[in-house]
């Protein structure tokens, strides 16, 4: 099968076409013929050499795909050849075929095209597991989402609105603001022109903050947070080493958490998949949730897809199609 390999670590240029044997599904896995694969932030970090795959995982990039089942392991009973689905992978998505744990797969939601479905698993698993899974959501609460025009941000905005939250989001331009508003954001904040801290404080403070920025946003998030707020850190685009005053965390009773999805156990991911299928996937049928695709490129143009993502001007997901 054709794949995209990383010829060393570095910039997008290290991504090159290669050839590998088709994977053989383990007893609890299925083999998927890939329709499309999503491009995500962790792919870029792994390409730079800072996010090695877990032991036993594929060294190929690609954490989500959509496609068709072509073979099944003898112990799984959820899927059969010919089924169409989207899947959270543990790597290996930048290829024509990938083997995936059967219980990490979900059907294509109603109203979503097969190609676009490739952009759902990574961000929906990530946002749902960090923000909503097993959590009490304050009624009519304020949800601050940083980076509202990207994959994580656009997913978080939609889920926040669907769960009845007032969504405030930071964006970099008027075009990004219009995009975030189209997803249902209550208030868009152009960070080049406005400060999100006083805006959130004027609204009573943020009950939940989802951050991918880090750097000086860490202290500013604490200022923007309401008492008993939750702050969730998913990435550190401006750096993870900061000096802050932690006293407000204690005084406001703030919960500060963070996680990476790939390192979570297979059992946890299966739990999240079941929760998404039960509570979130039906919302697509009513039109309150939708896939958001910025661009679809041939798999051979994976390097260009990474350049587009690194430029930070995309609105929604970038997908690769074998």
Image (spheres, rainbow, N blue to C red):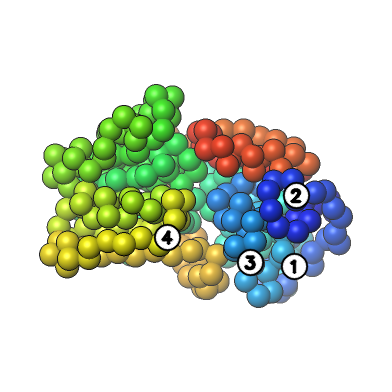
Determine which of the numbered discs, if any, sits on residue 15 in the image: 2
Mark nearer the N terminus (1 vs 4): 1
Find the distance from the CA under tag 1 to the CA under tag 2: 25 Å
Find the distance from the CA under tag 3 to the CA under tag 2: 16 Å
Residue at 56% in and 37% down:
311
Residue at 71% in and 65% down:
58
Residue at 85% in and 53% down:
18
Image coords of residue 158 (percent x, y): 38, 41
Find the distance from the CA under tag 3 to the CA under tag 4: 18 Å
The residue indicated by pointer 4 is 240
Q: Can residue 223 be seen at all in this image of the molecule? A: yes
Q: Please tell me whether mark 2 or mark 4 is closer to you in this view.
A: 4
Q: Camera-side residue: 73 or 205?
A: 205
Query: Is 110 on the left or on the right of 65, as rendered?
Result: left
The residue indicated by pointer 1 is 25
Q: Please tell me whether mark 3 or mark 4 is closer to you in this view.
A: 4
Query: Is 141 on the left or on the right of 265, as rendered?
Result: left
Determine which of the numbered discs, if any, sits on residue 52 in the image: 3
Q: Camera-side residue: 294 or 290?
A: 294
Residue furthest front in the image: 243
Image coords of residue 193 (percent x, y): 31, 29
Find the distance from the CA under tag 3 to the CA under tag 1: 22 Å
Q: Secondary structure at mark 3?
A: loop
Q: Secondary structure at mark 2?
A: strand
Q: Please tell me whether mark 1 or mark 2 is closer to you in this view.
A: 2
Mark nearer the N terminus (3 vs 4): 3
Query: Is 293 on the left or on the right of 134, as rendered?
Result: right
Image coords of residue 224 (percent x, y): 21, 49
Mark nearer the N terminus (3 vs 2): 2
Image coords of residue 161 (percent x, y): 32, 41
Q: Secondary structure at mark 1?
A: loop
């Amino acid at each position: 099968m054709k794949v995209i390999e990383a010829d060393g670590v570095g910039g997008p240029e290290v991504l090159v076409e290669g050839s590998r044997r088709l994977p053989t599904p383990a007893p609890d896995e299925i083999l998927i013929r890939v329709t499309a694969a999503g491009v995500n932030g962790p792919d870029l970090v792994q390409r730079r050499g800072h996010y090695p795959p877990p032991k036993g995982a594929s060294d190929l990039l690609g954490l989500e795909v959509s496609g068709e089942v072509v073979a099944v392991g003898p112990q799984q009973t959820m899927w059969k050849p010919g089924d169409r689905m989207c899947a959270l992978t543990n790597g290996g998505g930048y290829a024509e075929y990938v083997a995936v744990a059967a219980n990490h797969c979900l059907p294509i939601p109603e109203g979503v095209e097969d190609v676009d479905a490739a952009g759902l698993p990574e961000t929906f698993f990530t946002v749902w597991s960090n923000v909503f899974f097993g959590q009490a959501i304050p009624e009519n609460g304020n949800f601050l989402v940083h980076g509202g025009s990207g994959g994580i941000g656009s997913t978080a905005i939609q889920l926040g609105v669907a769960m009845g939250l007032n969504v405030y989001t930071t964006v970099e331009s008027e075009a990004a603001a219009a995009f975030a508003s189209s997803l249902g954001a209550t208030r868009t904040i152009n960070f080049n022109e406005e400060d999100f801290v006083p805006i959130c404080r004027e609204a009573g403070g943020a009950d939940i903050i989802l951050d991918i920025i880090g750097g000086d946003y860490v202290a500013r998030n604490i200022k923007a947070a309401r008492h008993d707020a939750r702050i969730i850190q998913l990435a550190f685009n401006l750096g993870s080493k900061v000096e802050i005053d932690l006293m407000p965390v204690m005084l406001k009773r703030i919960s500060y958490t963070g996680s990476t999805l790939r390192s979570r156990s297979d059992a946890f991911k299966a739990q999240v998949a079941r929760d998404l299928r039960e509570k979130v996937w039906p919302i697509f049928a009513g039109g309150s949730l939708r896939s958001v695709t910025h661009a679809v490129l041939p798999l051979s143009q994976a390097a260009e897809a990474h350049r587009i993502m690194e430029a930070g001007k995309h609105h929604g997901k970038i997908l690769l199609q074998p």
